[in-house]
Amino acid sequence: MIQDPAYLRAGAVLTVDLDAIAANWHGLREAGRRDGRRTDCAAVLKANGYGTGAIVVAQRLATEGCRHFFVAHIDEGIALRRALPDASIYVLNGLIPGSEDELAVHGLVPALHDLAQISAWRACAQRLNRALDAVIHYDTGMHRLGMSSAEVDILVNDRGRMRGLRLALLMSHLVASEEPDKPINNDQLERFRNFVARMPGAPASLANSSGIFLGAAWHFDLLRPGAALFGINPTPDRNNPMRQVVGLWGKILQTHRVDALDTVGYGQNWRAARTSRIATIAVGYADGYLRSLGNRGQGFIEGYRVPLVGRVSMDLITIDVTDLPESMTPPGTLVELIGPHNTPDQLAEQARTNAYEILTSLGARYHRVYLAAQPHA
């Protein structure tokens, strides 16, 4: 890696452990099979695989046996189809008017959110003179996308509306699965069970990452993990059962001395209480290192904590390395910003956000390194 010219000129390095992603997928699939059912496990790869690289991750998971992939946008699905010609690829945002032919040409399956979308997709099937797969999304409480109960009643009583379509999946989305004690989890489960009973013959999917840990009742036929695949804790009230996937190391560009009472960075909002050594790192908010981490973030050098001081600027951050010997901080030194000492969940707490935003904000300027990118024997 050190001899790679792209690595040598990079200001920061993002590592993605493909073995960890594969292990997380296998673990989640097995969690869905502990009740004796043959529950299958998909992979949600929207937002470029939560910032890790959807194509590379999808290819690895396909070698592990994953056959179902979910994206948010049509273009994400088109890109994935080029890499996975035989996989089932579902588009969660559904049927944007005028997109029907593109979906059909690329073999993508839209989640249909209302009767009008069902009609439009059926018209496309008739126009092409072939059956098209479809997902029916029932809104059990999220109130973002999905069919209402009134529309479900109409569909159940008039299944002819589905003529020319193959019902590939029934789905809904959990509102608060990471909070297992919230009553809405059981409410949504009951609504979804009733929906599935009224639409027999199709596989069903309800559990997202955290939903898998609610128990077997939520598993149905297909699990839909996203964040947990990438190491985000699906059980925030407990220890993280997932392997960590992402590492981010920024390189020190320069280390300089500041006197007591000197300020660092824009706005003069950090002032040295003592003579200090400040290291400047080639990472900033243009790289997805959130501006809210100013004066709250931290890095690690050989396991030693070094606090971020001053504001996060577009391309740079500054850390206080006063307590480390100068021999540990020459230019080019790698500083762990995400890794074993500072997980995405911990960084999210410092930034006052969630780990989803941390990962999906990861910038394109990082030099990406995929670790142990070999399928399991």
Image (cartoon, rainbow, N blue to C red):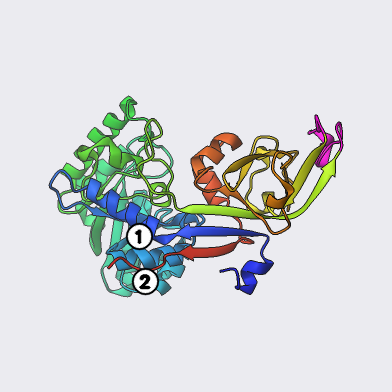
- Residue 51 lies, in percent from the top left, at 52, 56
The residue at the far left in this view is 36
- Residue 354 lies, in percent from the top left, at 51, 39
Amino acid type, mark 1: Phe
- Would you say the magenta stretch is mainly helix, strand or loop? loop
Q: Nearer the viewer, residue 164 or 286?
A: 286
Magenta region: 259-274
Q: Nearer the viewer, residue 255 or 281?
A: 255
Instruction: Say few, some or many: other residues with alpha carbon within 10 Å of mark 2 (under 14 / 14 to 19 / 20 or more).
Output: some
Q: Could you tell whether 32 is left or right of 111 in the image? A: left
Instruction: Say few, some or many: other residues with alpha carbon within 10 Å of mark 1 (under 14 / 14 to 19 / 20 or more).
Output: many
Residue named by callout 1 = 69
Q: Could you tell me which secondary element the residue under label 2 belongs to? A: loop
The residue positioned 35% from the left and 40% from the top of the image is 210
Amino acid type, mark 2: Leu
The residue positioned 60% from the left and 59% from the top of the image is 13
Looking at marks 2 and 1 on the same chain, the residue that comes earlier in the sequence is marked by: 1
Residue named by callout 2 = 84
Cβ atoms under marks 2 and 1 closer than 8 Å: yes
Name which quarter of the figure residue 303 lies in: top right
